[in-house]
Amino acid sequence: MDLTYLLDRIPEAWLLALGGLIVGVAFGAFAQQSRFCLRAAALEFSRGRPSDRLPVWLLAFSSALIATQVLMHFGEVQASEARQLASPQSLSGALLGGLMFGTGMVLARGCASRLLVLSATGNLRALLSGLVFAVVAQASLRGILKPVREWFAGLWTTVDIGGNDLTAQLGLTQGVTLAFAFLWFFAGLVFAWKARKSAWQLVAACGAGLAIPLAWWFTSTMARQAFDPVQVEGVTFTGPSADTLMLVLSPPGNLLDFDIGLVPGVFLGSFLAAFLTRELALQGFEGGKSMARYLTGATLMGFGGMLAGGCAVGAGITGASIFALTAWITLSGIWLSAAVTDRLMEGQGIFRPRLAGEIGNPN
């Protein structure tokens, strides 16, 4: 598809922000309706009780992989120009950041994208946790925590192993990567059938996943056709959350880009979906201990996500969809630490996140 018609009528920066807004609305609406949540999926898996959330995550994840790989095959997505593959990435940051992020999302009862989606439905716990996440992410990107992040990130990088492209490292063909993605998709369908998921929820899960290749396609097309340089990117929330926060607090010189449209878009999409299905409801904290747990988790996710170069969506799905090695390391770290944190909290009698009844807004 050619964007020349739109580029001739809309300034490039505005078109980038509009594209981010549209992708965000799609992701937010579908994520809200499908109850997309990596934390709940990881806990279902670790407890050996796959139910509602695991098939949703698997379908979103595999849909993103399949569609992105198909677009790459037809030359519609230039993955080699994406930050994850075009520049050196931190292996140590991916591992440590993933471990921190997984622990944080269990404590905060949702990853960064889930907090954003829930906050739009009236969940004040998610809203405050999301703000803390954005503040810590900004402090890690450009503020007081930047030296600490850079030190950890510099311990081991992809320069040491010859690159971050997992397909090149393992010699995988595109046929192999597609077959791998379809295996995950089939697994998602099997678990969905066992959980008796509704057809709409399965469609919504795939819709949330397809927002990732939509972002890849749009930014790749803009990079080819726009006059000014455009970064090829997918969907992520760590950096964009920090940028959106600074836009509100201290607007930079260059206000508009894809990321600036993305976060408000997700909020808007989730709000509209919840409004139309009558799922808006104000919810708050249940006490001081609950609040401390949420904010501790948000802090760990803010630093961990920035250290890893992405959140559960940005690294876990977006980066994985182009087979960036660091994304798979981060994703593995998130799943592992979520399971370990859940078990440790149960053993100490502190708090065990519930699975039953979480399809609504969790406590």
Image: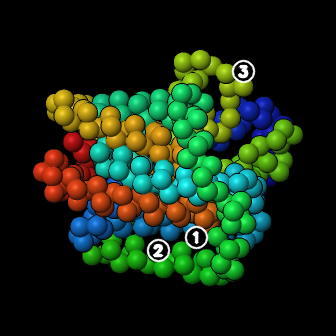
Q: CA distance from mark 1 to mark 3?
A: 38 Å
**Residue 284's x, y, as percent?**
23, 30
The answer to whether mark 2 and mark 1 are in CB contact below 8 A is: yes
Which is more foreground, mark 3 or mark 2?
3
Please state which of the two labelled residues, at mark 1 or mark 3, is closer to the viewer.
3
Q: Nearer the viewer, residue 20 or 40?
A: 40
Colour pattern of the rendering:
rainbow
Q: CA distance from mark 3 to mark 2?
A: 43 Å
Looking at the rendered image, the quarter that the N terminus falls into is: bottom right
User: Which amino acid, by three-letter code, is at mark 2?
Assistant: Phe
- Type of amino acid at the residue the image marks with label 1: Ile
What x and y, as percent, mark residue 10? Answer: 77, 33
- What's the amino acid at mark 3? Gly
Q: Earlier in the sequence, mark 1 or mark 3?
A: 1
Q: Which residue is mark 3?
A: 253
> Could you say which is closer to the camera, residue 114 or residue 165?
165
Residue neighbourhood size for the residue with mark 1, other residues' Cα within 10 Å, grouped as few (<14), some (14–19), many (≥20): many
Of labels 3 and 2, earlier in sequence is: 2
Nearer to me, 7 or 149? 149
The residue under label 2 is 185
For the residue labelled by badge 2, is the local secondary structure a helix, a strand or a loop? helix
Task: Tell me the number on the disc at residue 66.
Answer: 1
> Up-down: is 271 above or below 212?
above
Identify which residue is drawn at 55% across, 41% down.
149
